[in-house]
Structure formats: C-alpha cells, structure tokens
Amino acid sequence: MHGIITNIQRFSLHDGPGIRTTVFLKGCNLRCFWCHNPEDMNPQPEIQFFPERCIACAACVDACPNCAHRFEDDRHLYHRERCDACGSCIETCYAGGLVRVGEEKSVDEVMAEVRADQPFYTSSGGGVTLSGGEPLLQIDFAYAILDRCRGEGIHTAIETAANFTWERVAAILPVVDLIMMDIKLMDSARHRQATGAPNERILANAARLGYEPQPIIVRTPIIPGVNDNVDEVCAIAEFVAHMPNLCYYELLPYHPMAQSKYMSLGLSYKAQPLATPSTAQMVELADAARECGVPVRVG
Ligand code: SF4
Ligand code: SF4
C-alpha cells in the first residue's frame, strides 16, 4: 500500500504527548486562508520554485519536456499549468531553486522511519501522529500505518478537521489512541468563508467523537479578524465542555510563517498582513475559555 506524503518529522514535540514522529499526508479538503502548510493542500505532488535561489543557469529550460520553464528579459518564468511534476528539471537544478513536494511512499517505508525512534517513544510516552493536510483523505494508507504502529506497540494519534461523513471518521478509530481535532468557528456561514466549507458535519462529528473511548484534544487556531475574540472562543469552549473524553482545549496563536511557501507554490498568502495575537490576548482568551468549564492550554 502506498500514499503521498510531504514530510516525516522526527522528534516532534507539539503533535501529541511525548516525543513523536509526525507523518504529513498530502491533500486537504479545507482551504483555510491562514494555513501554514500550503504544501499539504493539493493531494498531488507539485514543484516549489524559489526564485531567490535561482542562478539563471537555464538547465531546467532544456530539461523540461513540457516547456514549463523559460526566460524572458532575464527573468525566469515557471508555467505551473504546463508542469506534470515529472521531476526532470529538479535533477538539473543544483542551486536548489526547484524542489519537489510530495512523495509516494509505501507503508513499509514509512514504518522503517517511524521504527527508528521507538526507544524515544518508550522513554517519553510518545508515538506517531498522522497530520497534513488531512490524513483521512488517504484513509486506507492512514489506517495501514496506524494499524502497523499499534501492532508494534507504538502510540498513535491523528490530527483531523473531521470534514467527512461519520462513517469515514469512525473507520479510523479502531487504530487511533488519541484524536486531535480542530474547531475553528461555530457559525457555518463564517466557517465557509474562512475555510471554504460549512461546518455542520464537522460539529456533528466532533459531538460524536466526544463520546468515543479515545481521549480527544480540541484545538482552535486563533486568527485575527476570524475568531480572536472572547465570544467566539467561549462558544467553542461551551460546545467542547460537553465532551466526556476531552483532555483539554488548546488555543494556537496564528503565526505568519508561511509566506515563502505560498510564493514557491504560486499561491497568494491572504493571511500575510495579519499579526500574531499578543500573549496578553491569548491569556485573556484562555481565561475566558476556562470559565466555560474546560481545561485550557495555549500552544
Ligand atoms: S535549473 Fe535551477 S538554477 Fe538553473 S535556471 Fe532552473 S531554477 Fe534556476
Ligand atoms: S517537473 Fe517536469 S514538467 Fe514540471 S517543470 Fe520540471 S521538468 Fe517540467
């Protein structure tokens, strides 16, 4: 069994308990305009072009069978719409101006990397986390990895927005030890505006996940102008307060780290003008959420 991943991040400390290996699966069915992993949106492999690294050697022009690279007035133009991500140009680019993002890997290949850190999982209470992107888009691949981890005594976690039918969400649960789920907004129209999708089934799934045997961590990225206010955070906190298996509710401050990634993928970064919420604001939001009766952490 194979899937498409963008990265396997070892020694991860922010994707669940202990020291973890986080496997990023490519593809997402939301389009949050602040997403800091834009390379995980498109389910297919694609090419990142970093103009600032290009030394204008023109090797890629000769290498590309689809004429996706050309020079005009000494400017390197990359026609992404002609590219089928064959990778020929990358092999000729010694300057690192062209990078493939997204690689097909087998479950065995993923497990070989995951297994290398088993002593750290054991000593720290860590394990493996599937992230992305949205891991449930490649559910068979995701299931196979987590099933193998379980079989080898490795703790498993999944980060999901649960924007699927309940049947798909429920299908992964037999191999999951910890659920980490985002809730970004309670109002569906505003959710659609911010993420590209309504939130009715997300909230319905969250309500059901709250009664599953696995512990759940609910997280809200705090985005200026979207949900950085007490009313919105308290509405979510009141919703998750009813979950019997809630570990804690986590608030994650927006950080404008992704601009160069957006540019390299030919995408516009609409969140670029936004500022990171201040510590004082995060403390205020966390205190307000605590008053709704849930344990709160700030990421
Ligand atoms: S091969 Fe790399 S360095 Fe050379 S022109 Fe293409 S992108 Fe620039
Ligand atoms: S990946 Fe292949 S098709 Fe795309 S620009 Fe490079 S050589 Fe051309």
Image (spheres, rainbow, N blue to C red):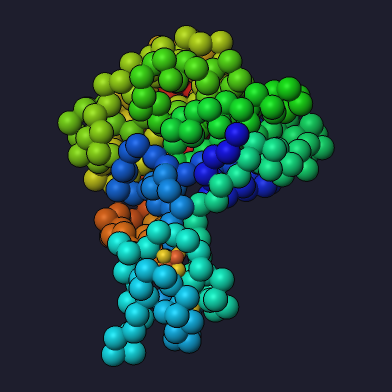
Regarding residue 280, the answer to whether it shows in the image is no
Residue 213 % position (x, y)? 56, 10
Residue at point 22% right, 35% down? 192
Q: Quick check: 179 left or right of 110? A: left
Residue at point 26% right, 21% down? 200
Residue 290 % position (x, y)? 43, 25
**Vertical arrangement, residue 260 with respect to residue 280, above or below:** below
Q: Quick check: 71 left or right of 225? A: right
Give 22 or 219, whichever is nearer the viewer: 22
Dividing the picture into quadrants, the one containing residue 184 is top left
Residue 153 % position (x, y)? 76, 24
Q: Quick check: 84 left or right of 25? A: left
**Vertical arrangement, residue 55 with respect to residue 87, above or below:** below
**Vertical arrangement, residue 122 with respect to residue 270, above or below:** above
Q: Which residue lies furthest to the left in this view?
A: 189
Residue at point 42% right, 79% down? 61
Residue at point 40% right, 31% down? 161
